[in-house]
Image (spheres, grey):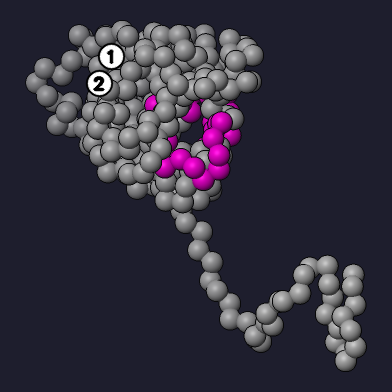
């Protein structure tokens, strides 16, 4: 399925160029090893997510971890088809999701917020489309530690991922909380410095022993899982028992002894 807006001119959308650049970086050694670590973490959490419909928005690489999901109907949506195999099922912008409200059980955003032009609007669309108690799973780059410093040194003219806007875990939690989500899991991933993986490989496992799931200082990225809250209403007992309506809406019941008056 192709969204009409996306089909008109997807190349003019800023996120398409950023996503294509990120996919190219994920094919390089450092990006490929980071993607493998993220896929392993994603595989673990997908086993506990249930429902009928799962949507992946703007994947930066092939998501083999989706095979671990118990949700049978899985949709891949993107604003840019280049560099992604197999071809995605939906071509659309993440700021305007082409799904009915309260229709999707889970969304997976693998760096989609950093690629998007307006991440706030993307989250609002996620909130609109998710069913109550639906899940959103976010993979994002860590703006702190080695990777955040590398991004600052690279400058705005650098290629992805260093040109992207890194969104911290706490900021993302705040955004989701305002929309009515509860964060149920956060994990920091890939404790390796942001240079060539051959130079940064931890041969003795020192970095892995120092790394903690809740410490951002060594991690390259993070995984966050949030659940949409169910709005609960407290029933109020009426002061009197309402009379049962038996007349059509266009008829006003007479309060005297005469005939009903028609409106």
Query: Which element carries disc 1, helix, strand or loop?
Result: helix
Specify the quadrant of the image occupied by residue 194: top left
Q: Quadrant of the C terminus?
A: bottom right
Q: Quadrant of residue 82?
A: top left
Horizontal placement of 19 versus 259: left or right? left
- Are the residues flagged by discs 1 and 2 in contact, CB closer than 8 Å? yes
Observer-nearest residue: 190 or 16? 16
Q: What's the magenta region?
A: 97-123
Task: State whether residue 138 is above or below residue 147.
Answer: below
- For residue 2, say whether it is visible: yes
Residue depicted at 43% across the width and 18% down the height: 88
Give yes or no for residue 216 being in the magenta stretch: no
C-alpha distance separating marks 1 and 2: 6 Å
Q: Secondary structure at mark 2?
A: helix
Which residue is identified by label 1? Answer: 32
73 on left or right of 171: left
Residue 98 highlighted magenta (yes or no): yes
User: Image point 34% across, 27% down: which residue?
Assistant: 221
What residue is shown with label 2?
A: 36
- The answer to whether residue 246 is left or right of residue 39 is right
Q: Position of residue 202 (x, y in %)?
A: 15, 19
Few, some or many C-alpha atoms within 10 Å of disc 1 (few <14, some 14-19, many ≥20)?
some
Height in image: 42 above or below 165?
Answer: below
Q: What x and y, as percent, mark residue 189?
A: 27, 29
**Image location (x, y in percent) of residue 96:** 59, 30
Numbered circle sitting on residue 49: none
Closer-to-camera residue (81/221): 81
Q: Residues within 10 Å of mark 2 (few under 14, many from 20)?
A: some
The location of residue 72, given as percent across then percent down, is 33, 35
């Amino acid at each position: 399925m192709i969204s009409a807006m996306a089909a008109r001119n997807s190349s003019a959308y800023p996120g398409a160029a950023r996503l294509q650049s990120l996919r190219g970086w994920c094919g390089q050694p450092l990006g490929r090893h980071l993607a493998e670590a993220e896929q392993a973490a994603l595989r673990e959490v997908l086993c506990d997510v249930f429902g009928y419909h799962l949507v992946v928005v703007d994947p930066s690489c092939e998501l083999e971890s989706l095979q671990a999901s118990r949700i049978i109907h899985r949709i891949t949506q993107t604003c840019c088809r280049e560099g992604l195999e197999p071809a995605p099922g939906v071509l659309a912008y993440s700021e305007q999701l082409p799904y009915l409200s309260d229709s999707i059980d889970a969304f997976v955003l693998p760096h989609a917020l950093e690629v998007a032009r307006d991440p706030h609007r993307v989250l609002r669309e996620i909130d609109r489309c998710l069913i109550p108690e639906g899940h959103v799973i976010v993979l994002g780059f860590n703006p702190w530690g080695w990777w955040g410093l590398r991004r600052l040194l690279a400058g705005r003219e650098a290629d992805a991922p260093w040109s992207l806007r890194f969104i911290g875990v706490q900021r993302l939690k705040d955004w989701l909380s305002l929309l009515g989500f509860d964060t149920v899991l956060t994990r920091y991933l890939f404790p390796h410095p942001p240079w060539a993986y051959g130079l940064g490989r931890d041969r003795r496992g020192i970095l892995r022993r120092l790394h903690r799931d809740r410490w951002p200082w060594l991690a390259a990225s993070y995984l966050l899982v949030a659940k949409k809250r169910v709005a609960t209403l407290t029933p109020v007992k009426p002061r009197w028992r309402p009379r049962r309506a038996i007349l059509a809406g266009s008829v006003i019941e007479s309060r005297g002894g005469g005939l009903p008056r028609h409106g």
